[in-house]
Image: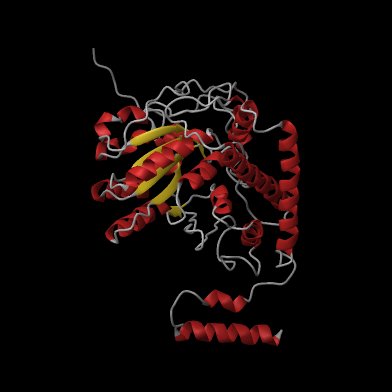
Amino acid sequence: MITKSRLQIPRPTARPGDKPDFSFLELSPAGSVDKPPLGSRTRDIEFLSSGLVRVLDDDFKAKGPWDPNLDPKQLQVALRWMMLTRALDDRMWQIQRQGRISFYMQSLGEEAVSIAQGMALRPGDMCFPSYRNQGLYLYRGVKLVDMMCQCLSNTRDMCKGRQLPVMYHSKAGNVFSISGNLATQFPQAVGWAMASAIKGEDHIAASWVGDGSTAEADFHYAVTFAAVYQAPIILNVVNNQWAISTFQGTAGGQRRAFAARGLGLGIPGIRVDGNDLLAIYSATLWAADRARRGGGPTLIELVTYRGGAHSTSDDPTKYRPKDEWESFPLGDPLERLKQHLIVEGHWSEKQHEKLEKELHAEVLAAWKEAQTYGTMTEGPFLDPASMFEDVYAEMPTNLESQRRRMLEVLGGD
């Protein structure tokens, strides 16, 4: 009997109006995945790319070999950073809806990724983020007011009005500029890691892309170079289930875990509960130690869920069930850490409510300050002449001429 081949079209398990269905999501019980020695060969730890490293169980207790045994004070600090990130996102989303900034992207539901990995990395390590890593910037010392000013493109804008909102950077914090072109940061990060190794440093690089970006050519170039040259880098794939309106299966996530993408090149992959701060911290620390000891790259898939819209330009109710996030089996990362601390006797609802109010007040105060440096409609405004700067070491005569003519016109007004 001859059967005809058929083109397989990846389809999400639920659309608007359907009941959320996460039956495709393969989960492992908390504490059930082994933690191998750092020197393990990739072929011997393939199980890490198919299982799911989890520490917090359904009762918010820490279990298993990946439990990092962090001090309760450290966890309280981590919770504060996550709450601050969410408070910033809430405020900036409202501000965009009021027409006071042009664009914004939330990290709702993904806060544990940036904070846990920021905790596990060293200050000298270089980060090449995506546009949902605002928590990483906060953790690495970027002030709320400076992030807001970047979104306002005002006189304190770190990008001098030359970038889309949310495309931050921080030289002092070792956080590279965000690019709106998907996956470009991956090969850049690998190149930086290779340079670090050439110089004999123990600094590593870390980079983040979404599940959809794994279909970009830059992703595959980066993985190949990282494997061939054994670059000291952590390559993170944040699998939040949706690439704008495209289900993660379109990038191949239904066939095999994204954590397995590097196995054919000899790069070990770890599939991690992306809503479990303890698991993320532990897996990242393992990969970082491995890279510093000459073990080469590790690919980490962080299984999470994008709780909000892709951006302020997106309406997720057009392509997924309205209540899908509430049904996500790995829950809310902020709530899980909060409940873990409460269960262990190191936190309370009263403390949480108090901190929540304090952080919202802190964000509001930062917004009021940010506006003093200019808004989209009120001064002070950026000097238009600055658009000609920072491209050439010495300004070419044609640009100098254009700059002079522009100033003459402005002066005439």
Residue nearer the viewer, 105 or 27: 27
Q: Is residue 81 left or right of residue 197?
A: right
Q: Is residue 110 left or right of residue 347?
A: left
Instruction: Tell me if residue 102 can be seen.
Output: yes
Between 262 and 352, the residue placed more toward the observer is 352
| Residue 335 drawn at (x, y percent) | 63, 32
Q: Residue at x 42, y 41 (%)?
A: 285
x, y percentage for residue 186?
Answer: 39, 51
Q: Which quarter of the figure has residue 74?
A: top right
Q: Residue at x 53, y 36 (%)?
A: 277
Residue at left offset 55%, top offset 62%: 163
Residue 304 visible within the image? no
Image colouring: secondary structure
Residue nearer the viewer, 373 or 320: 373
Among the 4 quarters of the image, the one containing residue 365:
bottom right
From the viewer's side, name the closer residue of 98 and 369. Answer: 369
Q: Position of residue 72 (x, y in %)?
A: 58, 36
**Quadrant of the snapshot with the C terminus:** bottom right
Residue lying furthest top: 1
Vertical side of 212 occupied by 396: above or below:
below
Q: Which quarter of the figure has residue 124?
A: bottom left
Would you place residue 398 above or below residue 258 in this image? Answer: below
Q: Residue at x 63, y 27 (%)?
A: 326
